[in-house]
Image (cartoon, rainbow, N blue to C red):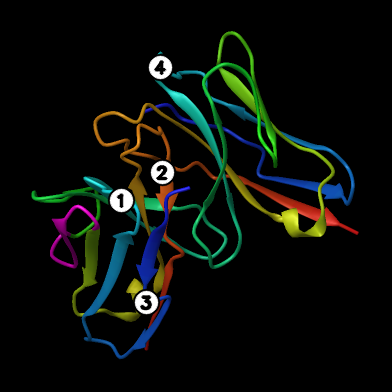
Amino acid sequence: GAVVSQHPSRVICKSGTSVKIECRSLDFQATTMFWYRQFPKQSLMLMATSNEGSKATYEQGVEKDKFLINHASLTLSTLTVASAHPEDSSFYICSARSDRGEEKLFFGSGTQLSVL
Amino acid sequence: LAKTTQPISMDSYEGQEVNITCSHNNIATNDYITWYQQFPSQGPRFIIQGYKTKVTNEVASLFIPADRKSSTLSLPRVSLSDTAVYYCLVGDGSGGFKTIFGAGTRLFVKA
């Protein structure tokens, strides 16, 4: 199946630091990618839909100035957590829809962000 | 978007067949039903997808009744490594395939 690579897998940073997470579709083009966050023992919560060449669409309650999304190419979307604070500590996951006519999503391996 | 409802948790023993049912009463005509598996600190992994009737692959079967208002994921002969959270998702893949995750089912397989 299609492969989505997410990097880094773990980040530990000080409060106030900006953190960038990359999501790449390795063997297919992804015009649309999705970003989620997940707290321990909870389900994935959709944060935003990333569209190649246009602005991301954010879910209600998600601060677009805090979670900056860039989808500059058909294989790369980035999520930047601006001026991260301890409450932003979470597991962040990206996904991409296959362009092969398959009606399914492929997920990255996730990024564990810990803000001290 | 169709909302899904699954049991919060299930217990099983190694070697048993496990069936997890998902309710999706307001599924739309274009919607597919997809199941994912997630281990701790990992992204979800695709298990199986179907539109109607029965689908089988090397790891699971998916049963979908004619009205498509529910679906059942069947895992034959589970092992300890099948302990994970299983999510049922419904979506049509068009218009960006926005996907909302339900709570999922936490399966615990015991020896």
Nearer-N-terminus badge (2/1): 1
Tell whether A100 sits left or right of A70: right
Instruction: Report how far apart the C-alphas of labels 3 and 4 lie in the structure.
Output: 37 Å
Q: Relative to A85, is A107 above or below?
A: above
Task: Name the residue nearer the viewer: A4 or B62.
Answer: A4
* Relative image position of residue A94 (x, y in whole percent): 36, 57
Q: In the drawing, does residue A15 fall left or right of residue B30?
A: left
Residue with the mark numbered 1 = A34
The crowding category of the residue bearing disc 2, from other C-alpha atoms within 10 Å (few below 14, some 14 to 19, many at least 20), is many
Look at label 2 and name its amino acid.
Leu
> What whole-number distance in Å separates the C-alpha atoms at marks 2 and 1?
9 Å
- Could you say which is closer to the camera, residue A103 or residue A65? A103
Q: In the rendered structure, which amino acid carries the disc numbered 4? A: Ala
Is B33 displayed left or right of B78 in the figure?
Answer: left
Q: Are marks 2 and 1 in contact (CB under 8 Å)?
A: yes
Identify the residue position indicated by label 2 in the image: A105
Q: Kindly identify which chain the residue marked by label 4 belongs to.
A: B
**Part of the protein shown in magenta:** A64-75
Q: Secondary structure at mark 1?
A: strand
**Residue located at (32% from left, 38% from top):** B98
- The crowd level at tag 1 (other Cα within 10 Å; few <14, some 14-19, many 20+) is many
Q: Label 1 lies in what chain?
A: A
Percent coordinates x, y for residue A51 in the rendering: 17, 47
**Residue B28, labelled with which disc?**
4
**Does residue B71 appear left or right of residue B12 in this picture?**
left
Picture coordinates of residue B34, whole percent (x, y): 52, 34
User: Which residue position holds label 3?
Assistant: A8
